[in-house]
Amino acid sequence: MAIVRWDPFRDFGFVAANSWVPPVDIYQNGDHELVLKAELPDMTREDINITVENGTLTMSGEKKLSTEVKEEQFHHVERRYGSFSRAFSLPQTVDPAKVSAEYKNGVLTVRLPLREESKPRSIKVDVAA
């Protein structure tokens, strides 16, 4: 079971002025990997950082306000901009050397392969007659 730091204010939409929290889905893909998907619209690959260290996956970056439109031209802004950082404790079954990431259509997909020794295996039992 992964331990995730609880922030009571994040669930109510209260975050620091220049920060935001991208939504994330984490699921197991069969018996061979965990998959983390994060929504990071209007960002480039260069704006996203991913590190795996000491059993923790950290993704961070900065979503910048478009320079095409001047700040005084906005009438209403609902989307969040600024820096973000999210950290996830990885189970010991994940092989940190084989972690890979792909960014496509505003969605970051991080694949976390499981170690060979943690995958289930079948053992045939011979029965003596």
Image (tube, rainbow, N blue to C red):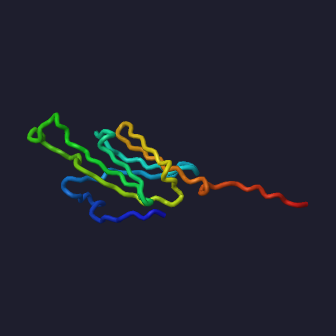
Query: Picture coordinates of residue 80 (x, y %)?
Result: 23, 48
Compared to residue 124, the image places residue 7 above or below, namely: below
Query: Picture coordinates of residue 25 (x, y %)?
Result: 42, 51
Q: Residue at x 39, y 44 (%)?
A: 108
Q: Is residue 33 left or right of residue 86?
A: right
As rendered, which of 12 and 71 lies closer to the eye? 71
Furthest residue toward right: 129
Q: Residue at x 44, y 47 (%)?
A: 110
Furthest residue toward left: 72
Q: Residue at x 45, y 60 (%)?
A: 55
Q: Is residue 62 left or right of residue 37?
A: left
Q: Is residue 54 left or right of residue 65?
A: right
Query: Picture coordinates of residue 46 (x, y %)?
Result: 31, 40
Furthest residue toward top: 68
Q: Is residue 104 left or right of residue 64?
A: right
Query: Picture coordinates of residue 123 (x, y %)?
Result: 73, 56
Q: Residue at x 19, y 38 (%)?
A: 66
